[in-house]
Image (cartoon, coloured by chain):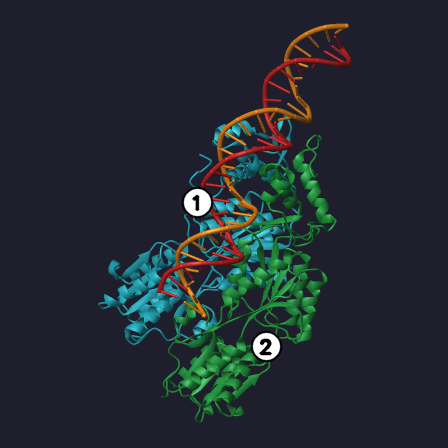
Chain colours: A green, B cyan, C orange, D red
Amino acid sequence: MIIDRSSPVPQYFQLQNWLREQIEQGVFKHDDKIPTEEELVHITGLARATIRQAIANLVNMGYLVRKRRLGTFVTLRKDLSQRKDIIGVLVPDIRAGYAPELARGVEDAAANNKLSTILCNTDDLFVKADFHADRLIENSVCGVIFVPTAAPDDKNRLIIEKFQKRNIPVVLADRILPDLDVDFVTTDNLQGAYLLTKYLLAKGHKKIGITLSTIFSTERDRLEGYKKALEDYGITVDPSIIKLHDGPYTEKHYLQSAKALFSQSGEMTAIFAGHDRIAYLVYSVARKMGIKIPAQMSLVGYDDLHPTYSNLISLTTMHQPIYEMGQESLKILLDKIQGGAETLQQVVLKSQLVERASVESLE
Amino acid sequence: MIIDRSSPVPQYFQLQNWLREQIEQGVFKHDDKIPTEEELVHITGLARATIRQAIANLVNMGYLVRKRRLGTFVTLRKDLSQRKDIIGVLVPDIRAGYAPELARGVEDAAANNKLSTILCNTDDLFVKADFHADRLIENSVCGVIFVPTAAPDDKNRLIIEKFQKRNIPVVLADRILPDLDVDFVTTDNLQGAYLLTKYLLAKGHKKIGITLSTIFSTERDRLEGYKKALEDYGITVDPSIIKLHDGPYTEKHYLQSAKALFSQSGEMTAIFAGHDRIAYLVYSVARKMGIKIPAQMSLVGYDDLHPTYSNLISLTTMHQPIYEMGQESLKILLDKIQGGAETLQQVVLKSQLVERASVESLE
DNA sequence: GTAAATGAATTGTTCATACAAATATACCGA
DNA sequence: TCGGTATATTTGTATGAACAATTCATTTAC
């Protein structure tokens, strides 16, 4: 029998010790569910309140976590010594693109779990990411969400390993590194671009220009999706209206690309911009050149940035669930932090076409 | 009464918070005896078990120690004052308005000083700000930059005092609280709006509509500047083309305001939008109504948001040095953190008119 | 097939009651 | 005076009973 009712040691304490021994001796392993309170009532003959007291203490000591409706689980007992309730988020630039939306998704989910969020801007540079990584480690964050920089894969890998070496879990967001066993959340860029291109084709566009950067996995996938759609439609890919570059976004560069596309447009009737910011630039260039969108040129983007933007320009684009991506990243991170889930979690979310008024139907 | 029995927040938790506040606010001081369980039963009307739960948690958190037969006592809150190199930034919403720019300014300056930045979104709500404040304190940040919420001044004051009570310096950014001796950085909104209005007047506009919220000090000042400029020009202020409201920005509200302004425009030839986001909405409404800007209606904003926006709309606006405001805030904060500078630092930056193409000259 | 409603399992909150254990204090006796 | 003893006070342990809230799983409805 577990409980000796004649003993002077309190019964909740006896139960508490028994449970702790089971855990430490591996009878209840990590992530195992221990008996429910009701079951423990039957096993021990104690009142539920007494059992709750024992369990509450073990929760406090970090042996157990309780989950409503699910039960009580053994958690990895690690030194609480340095674990802070802070996570780090590394984004390119909090002012630009989807970073605000992503950061907000992360922060909301983090706040819901009583975690604070340290924000770091990398400007897509390895050195900045590295600098911030050191700082995050110094502040002993308990987890990191990382949007890889524009640096080569092995550089980004270095950053990730820096954290992992110290048992700080990392989840990649949006951009991913191929052939690396890291948790990530991204969207299906290949399929998204495929659908978006098919949409243009269905609208009668045959010559579709595209401009993007091949330095990010996301945009590379979009290029693939674009090519695949064209091929499936039996249209030869025309390299002269594919304007690529191999660095992070700069206004200067895409101004050039846009001008180049417009000036040699030939029979080109539509432009696929690698993401919304590029689309905005293309749009502004078109305006300056007196080209009407969509009357003279159709335009699609990718991202569907914050409503403030979409009030200004009626851009047909592929909506990425960025906010949800942030939330999902945090959810996975939390799993890892709370010791559980050794399994790799690689989530690919679906995007959705948002039809606005930047595409002309040629039918 | 301490306990609100109709509240959805657990009663033990209410009591717990109340006790914690008493301790933190010094009502119960170090080594004081707090009321006995029996007394608390009488004070609160709760069952003893409930009271014990609240106290147990506080004991766990290190606020109290219990001594048999003697009572329960306030302990010296373990000095986590291991002041981390972390600051907190409280902004309304990192996705919207100038928040990204401000946050970036702060973060850059912080990084330059080897400080990390915890980002908090308040959504302009007191409760969220309060929640984050507690979290920041728990993480023992060494300073806070705070954009006051849309709550009444005394509520915002509570937040500020929460920090100050713990010797955590606070710098207000952008919005300020009158009659409160706190460091702040803002811009001269009165003068900015005055100049902007004078600019419109100089372009020959006599009937100038305006829409903004009076809930923020910044926008109130802009309204004053607007009125002052009109008066100096000998033009009677026409209340029918002043559309105010008294809450934070909502798209719905300003859609209404914009429509109202346009539909009763009379001889109105220009609109002064309280800030750029409002201007964007006004712009989109105009487009939907077929009103050409600036040909049929001139429009000015206030802020001069991120270039991504200004690529989309050629808005004449008052450029606020938001990024610099973030940097300056951090500089002041750093002064306070590093001990020195007891003197109040209240910085008012100058804004600068950016002339683009949303204003027609009527001369 | 998908969304909405329902049900069931489990922890979360609250109550009322009782007796146990520790201990400061007062009291008592030598 | 000293040492023990009783007593009152306060926290500690334990019980049992409800009902609430959350959320996974299933079923139902569209």
Image height of B242 relative to A50, above or below: below
At a point 73% along the width and 48% down the height, the residue shown is: A24
Image height of A144 relative to A257, above or below: above
- For the N terminus of chain B, which image quadrant? top left
Can you give x and y, in whole percent of width and height, for residue A38 in the image? 58, 43
Can you give x and y, in whole percent of width and height, for residue B305 in the image? 45, 68
- For the C terminus of chain B, which image quadrant? bottom left
For the residues tagged 1 and 2, is the chain the same? Answer: no
Is residue B344 visible in the rendered image? The answer is no
Residue D12 or residue B127, whichever sits in front: D12
Residue B206 or residue B78, whichever sits in front: B78
Amino acid at dot 2:
Ser
Locate residue B109: give its quadrant: bottom right
Q: Is residue A128 left or right of residue A298?
A: right
Numbered disc 1: what chain?
A: B
Image height of B72 relative to B290, above or below: above
At numbered mark 2, what does the secondary structure look like: helix, strand or loop? Answer: helix
Query: Which residue is the site of mark 1?
Result: B154
Q: Mark 1 Cα within 10 Å, few/some/many (few <14, many 20+)? A: few
At numbered mark 1, what does the secondary structure look like: helix, strand or loop? Answer: helix
* Residue farthest to the left, as pictured: B266
At a point 53% along the width and 60% down the height, the residue shown is: B326
> Which one is closest to the eye, mark 1 or mark 2?
2
Distance Cα–Cα, label 1 vs label 2: 50 Å
Can you give x and y, in whole percent of width and height, for residue B33 in the image? 59, 29
Query: Which residue is the site of mark 2?
Result: A217
Amino acid at dot 1:
Asp
Can you give x and y, in whole percent of width and height, for residue A87 in the image? 61, 58
